[in-house]
Image (cartoon, rainbow, N blue to C red):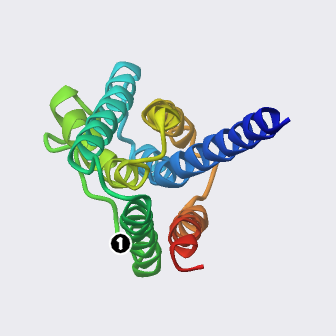
């Protein structure tokens, strides 16, 4: 009986963590949608192979950060993981909200003015887009093997949002604001159990 209850609890916890991982990936990837739209409206093309490269770069950098964080922070007690992870998410969310309120323009990565992003420019753009994902990955350290779903989700969403943004069919400034709020809430969700 106790074994079944424990198994049920583990399954519930795993399902909750999968939801958090997917929601976190969505939150840090919404900026990519804005980038895709900004470039499309400026008449700058991001070719399919470059979109794929940027998505893979995002996933790889996120996975490396996850591995490095897991290695460096191994042995820390769970409350420390929660405080560090929650703090990262709250700061990341606050940064996103401030960026939306300031309404800053996107950095121009089409350095040669060719109206098309090449592999070198794609590397710079992909690295910049991966920064939020890398930071968020560190917040997941210590949560078990399911967190390795996160780099896969961020890579997929990065590629998908670059394509969707290129269709110029959405206005995403408000969505970016919502993503900042979600990140703050996810951070609080991790931090509060340490104190209560």
Quickly name the residue at label 1: 104
Image coords of residue 73 (percent x, y): 26, 51
Residue at 33% x, 60% y: name it.
106
Residue lying farthest top?
Answer: 49
Image coords of residue 47 (percent x, y): 37, 25
Residue at 32% x, 45% y: name it.
130
Left-right relation of 70 to 165? left
**Residue 178 higher or lower than 108, as above or below:** below
Left-right relation of 128 to 4? left
* Secondary structure at numbered mark 1: loop
**Residue 183 higher or lower than 4, as above or below:** below
How many marks on residues? 1
Left-right relation of 15 to 187? right
Residue at 52% x, 46% y: name it.
25
Residue lying farthest right?
Answer: 1
* Quadrant including the C terminus: bottom right
Residue lying farthest front?
Answer: 1
Image coords of residue 3 (percent x, y): 76, 33
Classify mark 1: residues with Cα within 10 Å, few (<14), some (14-19) or many (20+).
few
Image quadrant in which you'd find residue 155 = top left
Image coords of residue 175 (percent x, y): 60, 62
Between 116 and 25, the one nearer to me in the picture: 25
Between 98 and 33, the one nearer to me in the picture: 98
Residue at 45% x, 72% y: name it.
90
* Quadrant including the N terminus: top right
**Residue 134 higher or lower than 103, as above or below:** above
């Amino acid at each position: 009986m106790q074994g079944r209850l424990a198994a049920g609890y583990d399954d519930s916890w795993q399902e909750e963590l999968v939801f958090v991982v997917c929601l976190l990936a969505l939150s840090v990837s919404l900026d990519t949608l804005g980038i895709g739209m900004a470039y499309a409206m400026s008449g700058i093309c991001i070719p399919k192979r470059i979109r794929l490269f940027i998505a893979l770069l995002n996933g790889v950098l996120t996975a490396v950060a996850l591995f490095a964080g897991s290695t460096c922070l191994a042995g820390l007690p769970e409350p420390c993981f929660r405080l560090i992870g929650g703090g990262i998410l709250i700061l990341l969310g606050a940064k996103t909200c401030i960026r939306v309120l300031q309404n800053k323009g996107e950095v121009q990565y089409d350095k040669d003015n060719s109206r098309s992003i090449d592999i070198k420019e794609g590397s710079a753009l992909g690295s910049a887009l991966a920064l939020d994902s890398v930071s968020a990955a560190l917040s997941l350290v210590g949560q078990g093997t399911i967190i390795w779903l996160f780099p896969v989700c961020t890579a997929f969403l990065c590629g998908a949002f670059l394509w969707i943004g290129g269709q110029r069919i959405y206005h995403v400034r408000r969505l970016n604001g919502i993503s900042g709020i979600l990140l703050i809430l996810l951070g609080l969700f991790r931090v509060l159990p340490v104190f209560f």
